[in-house]
Image: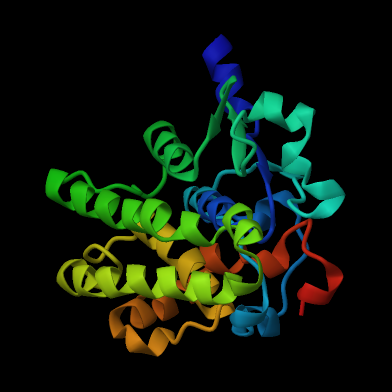
Amino acid sequence: MHVSLLLLAKPVLHGYFRSSCSWRVRIGESCTSIGLPACSLNAFTMLTKFALCTSAFALKGIEYDPVPVNLIQDGGQQLSEQYKKLNPMQQVPSVEIDGITVSQSLAVIQYVDETRPGPRLLPADPKGRAQVRMISDLIASGIQPLQNLHVLQKIGAEKAQWAQHFIERGFQALEPILKQTAGKYCVGDEISMADICLVPQVYNAERFKVDVGQYPTIKRLNRTLLEMEAFKVTHPSCQPDTPADLRS
């Protein structure tokens, strides 16, 4: 009975509208289920001008309570002692769910996939599951950490060139892999954790003026995924903490 009550409680997502890691988690849940403001069609088509959000919750249809953590304001709210108690790494996202706190977006996505109904985010087939994890880790470990806020603040004036270099290096590896694994989505014809990782990273690439047209498979998959409601409603331009000037 105690476990059942925990499962009925809404997860609490501590995140930032422009965080690609937070966006991965949001994609699993629909923002419409928590009464967030609707985004205009124009907001979705102007992807390159706006920030990042979450996805795993939207695909699973999970309702959650968002708690914004502003990575810029007050020197970075994630650096506060209060937030450090929640997440000692002082990063977003952090998710309070089922009586525990889970950080690291891939850990959150896999926990949600294992404990909640809805479409599988990792294939049942071991080979397919390995491919999904390979692509997800390539993005989440091999590309994104090298152009996140903390790193870019240390780089200084050369941050744009730094980000471009490491995104392009990662995409040069990712493109041939996706040519082998992709069907309609990153791995075959079922949406997965790999797709959840891809869209926020392409958004980041476009933000840093990377020519995504050089990578036709990545470009095609991203275009297909952005047509899905789960990716639209979790876009950075639709979040509770999105600044007014980035909403359209």
Return the x and y of residue 104 as percentages of the image width and height.
Answer: 50, 40
Q: Quadrant of residue 220?
A: bottom left
Query: In this rendering, does residue 192 appear at all?
Result: no
Identify which residue, 175 or 47, lies in the foreground.
175
Residue 130 to residue 47: above or below: above
Name the residue at 21% across, 65% down.
Answer: 188
Name the residue at 67% across, 82% down.
Answer: 41
Query: In this rendering, does residue 202 appear at all?
Result: yes
Return the x and y of residue 19 as percentages of the image width and height.
Answer: 61, 56
Q: Quadrant of residue 113?
A: top left
Whether residue 132 sits left or right of residue 166 in the image: it is left
Q: Quadrant of residue 131?
A: bottom left
Name the residue at 82% across, 66% down.
Answer: 243
Return the x and y of residue 75 as percentages of the image width and height.
Answer: 81, 48
Tally of marks: 0
Name the residue at 66% across, 59% down.
Answer: 153
Return the x and y of residue 121 as percentages of the image width and height.
Answer: 35, 49
Whether residue 70 sits left or right of residue 18 in the image: it is right
Q: Classify the position of the N terminus by image quarter.
A: top right
Q: Classify the position of the C terminus by image quarter.
A: bottom right
Q: How is the image coloured?
A: rainbow
